[in-house]
Amino acid sequence: MFALSALSPAFALPATGPGSALYATDAYPGFDAEGEIVSPGRKEPRWFGFIFGPKMDSAPEQMAWCRSLEGERRFSKAIREYDALVREWPFSAEAPVAQRRMADLLLDAGELEDAIAEYRYLLDFYRSQCDYSGVAKLLFMCCEMWRDEGKKFMFYRFANTIDVRRAYEALVLRAPGEAFAPAALLVIAGLREDEDRFDEAVEVYGNLRNIHPGSEAAHEAVFREAAARIKLLDKKGYNLSRCRDTVAFLRQAVELNAADPRAGELREMLEKAKALYEEECWKAARFYDSPTRTKRSAYSALERFLEEHPASSHAAEARARMAELKEGSR
């Protein structure tokens, strides 16, 4: 986890910070569709209420009953009865208290996925009746624990990158202005990389730099984004626009991080991207030098190549071909 103290901007883009809104109002590039992350629905009384409904006849009585269950250390039963209270009397003064206690008990029991869902419900439906910021911080802690421990299945744990990432995304959408948001975005981008979704990772890294410039997470994002962009070139094959964008990004990254101990890594990546870009430009120039193209278009393409890459290893070949075209040879 990264400390969130302010640093000098590592790679600042125009800031569009989230302000003080509880929910993010702008799209977050690289996130899943919002409907896949945030789909709150209010709890309703369960069927067969005489079996699964609350034991008592009023919210205050039910709350007292739940407290007594906790006192007897019957925590699983207390969780079910707190849930029944919220479902039966959702607008009572006891409902937000019951919802919070249910989430806390699930967290104490190590049921991270269920605890995350219940804390999220608390923020969705009782935001003005709970410590919103405090609950958001608890949610972040739960997400961190879930990422570290994996998702529990029977008596084993396994990594579930997509569900964990979506938990972080849902949290950022609910609390975009909290101090942990930059660190959460950095984790989301890293999990995208774990899924081999480097395009989305680059989008998240860029958004992090944009809305949280000067944070330590934003500084780290520059280097991670640079590496992700190079992986994209290696993974998806080269194309002119991708190479051009990567070169532009790395040039600015090198310039703004020249004093960083890892600046050499950026320079190495820049040289690799420039070499790939040069090759793509050469392929594009040669594309115009074919029987289906005019001599003028072929000559102009080679001329543009030399203007942009005068020291290229293909320069001599380009000049020779231009001379042939000028003399009228195909």
Image (cartoon, rainbow, N blue to C red):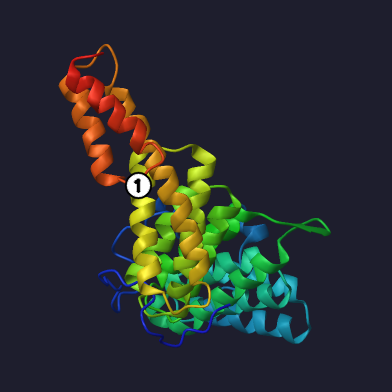
> Residue 132: x and y, percent?
43, 81
Q: Residue at x 56, y 64 (%)?
A: 117
The answer to whether residue 39 is visible is no
> Residue 157: x and y, percent?
77, 59
Q: Quadrant of residue 314?
A: top left
Position of residue 73 in the picture relative to residue 27 (left or right): right
> Residue 112: x and y, percent?
66, 68
Position of residue 19 in the picture relative to residue 327 (left or right): right
Position of residue 225 in the picture relative to residue 53 (left or right): left
Q: In the rendered view, would you say 103 is above or below 229?
A: below
Residue toward you, 329 or 59:
329
Instruction: Tell me which amino acid carries mark 1.
Output: Ala
> Residue 243: x and y, percent?
38, 45
Q: Quadrant of residue 305?
A: top left
Q: Residue at x 30, y 45 (%)?
A: 310
Q: Residue at x 48, y 77 (%)?
A: 136
Q: Residue at x 41, y 38 (%)?
A: 279
Query: Which of the image's four quarters has the C terminus?
Result: top left
Position of residue 117 in the picture relative to residue 7 (left or right): right
Residue toward you, 226 or 2:
226
Residue bearing the label numbered 1 = 311
